[in-house]
Image: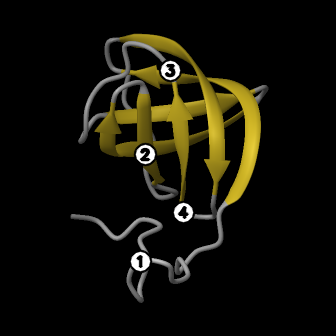
Amino acid sequence: MPKFGKRIDGPGGRRWIRRRKVSIAGSALFIDGTRSVLIEDLTLAGARLLGRGLPGAGAQLELRVGERSLPGEVTWAGADRRGIKFDFGKRMRA
């Protein structure tokens, strides 16, 4: 399992990357279409998204907010939430 945002010293400890709680509306472009999402928290390495009908772990995406976009991959899925890891060296193929 990837270590995106995981704690390095057990429960109650500190995460290795600081998360920032946000509430940013955006969209996630997947191979099968675009979904509206709410970015709930953000780090330099990834984000937690809230949205309906989002693909599961392993899905490639492009996260868009306004005119900005970042490629990434879904690393975990639970109910209507997804954890994504940014992939700065990759662009999604249409």
What residue type is disc 1 on? Pro
User: Quick one: SS at disc 1?
Assistant: loop
The earlier-in-sequence mark between 2 and 1 is 1
Q: Badge 4 is on which residue?
A: 45
What residue type is disc 2 on? Gly
> Which mark identifies residue 83?
2
> Residue at position x 37%, y 21% from top?
54
> Residue 64: where, in percent of width, then height?
64, 29
Instruction: Measure the alpha-carbon separation of dots 3 and 4.
Output: 20 Å
> Residue at position x 41%, y 89% from top?
9
How many numbered marks, from 0 up?
Answer: 4
Instruction: Measure the alpha-carbon separation of dots 2 and 3.
Output: 11 Å
Circles 2 and 3 in contact, beta carbons < 8 Å:
no
> Residue 22: where, in percent of width, then height?
75, 44
Pick whichever, 26 or 79, lies toward us: 79
Instruction: Measure the alpha-carbon separation of dots 2 and 1.
Output: 19 Å
User: Quick one: SS at disc 4?
Assistant: loop
Pick whichever, 11 or 52, lies toward us: 11
Q: Badge 1 is on which residue?
A: 11
> Which mark identifies residue 29?
none
The earlier-in-sequence mark between 1 and 3 is 1
Which callout, 1 or 3, points to the residue nearer the camera? Answer: 1
What residue type is disc 4 on? Ala
What residue type is disc 3 on? Gly
Q: Residues within 10 Å of mark 2 (few under 14, many from 20)?
A: many
Circles 3 and 4 in contact, beta carbons < 8 Å:
no
Q: Badge 3 is on which residue?
A: 51
